[in-house]
Image: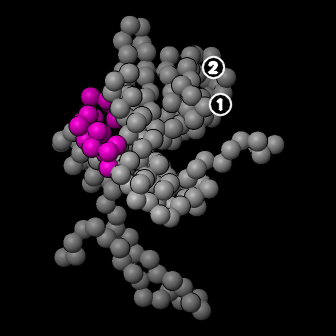
Amino acid sequence: MVIIPATSGQMGVLPGHMASIAELKPGLLSVHEGNSVSKYFVSSGFAFIHANSVTDIIAVEAVPIDRIDPSLVQQGLAEFNQKLNTASTDLEKAEAQIGITLHTALNLALTG
Amino acid sequence: MASNVAVPFWRSAGMTYITYSNICANMVRNCLKEPYRSEALTREKVHFSVSKWKDGKPEKPVIRSDTPED
């Protein structure tokens, strides 16, 4: 089973799942095989669930969570919270918001 | 039909999906441990040439590159 970070929430995909395309938000992707779990962080992207029970994950960056540095995540979160306060244009605000959402998701993936 | 689904905040701020996705990827790369971080940041390097066309002919190309010119 794979649990994917769909924009609509964590979504479980088992063999036999209906064919579907899901948009992914930055978050944890966990692959459960028997008793072992492999966890990855996906930056954003899509999941294609095919009728033959193959699921493709399309992401610009997908990293095993042990490659993430928790102190850099905390630093990033503080930086973007700061940027949100000083942002003036809609675009700057959106970028700061993306930063906050993404770093919060990274934190959650590391601690969850 | 899909009009009851809210537009994502980045779209309403004028950003396209590809820009959003690349920003997210860049932020993730910056949070990696070494040596993965330096490896990942090389994926952001670009090298391309753009030329505008006028009267059916290309004008002088503009080269955008992260690699130093030799």
Q: As drawn, which residue projects farthest toward the top?
A: A35
Q: As drawn, which residue projects farthest toward the bottom?
A: B55
Mark 2 belongs to which amino acid?
Answer: His
Residue at the spot of label 2? A17
Mark 1 belongs to which amino acid?
Answer: Ser
**Helix, strand or loop for disc 2:** loop
Residue at the spot of label 1? A20
Q: Nearer the viewer, residue A38 or B7?
A: B7
Most frequent secondary structure within the magenta stretch: helix
Please report the residue visible at 27 percent of the width from the left and 43 percent of the height from the top. Answer: A75
Kindly indicate whether the residue at mark 2 contacts the one at mark 1 (C-beta within 8 angstroms): yes
Q: As drawn, which residue projects farthest toward the right?
A: B1
Q: Residues within 10 Å of mark 1 (few under 14, many from 20)?
A: few
- As displayed, is residue A47 above or below residue B54? above
x, y (%) of residue A51?
65, 25
x, y (%) of residue B17?
55, 53
- As displayed, is residue B9 above or below residue A92? above
Please report the residue visible at 62 percent of the width from the left and 35 percent of the height from the top. Answer: A21
For the C terminus of chain B, which image quadrant? bottom left
Magenta stretch encompasses residue A77:
yes
Position of A107 compared to A54: left or right? Answer: left
Q: Nearer the viewer, residue A1 or A86?
A: A86
Task: Tell me the magenta residue range.
Answer: A62-79
> Where on the picture, by quarter, is residue B55?
bottom right
x, y (%) of residue A93?
48, 56
Residue A99 seen in render: yes
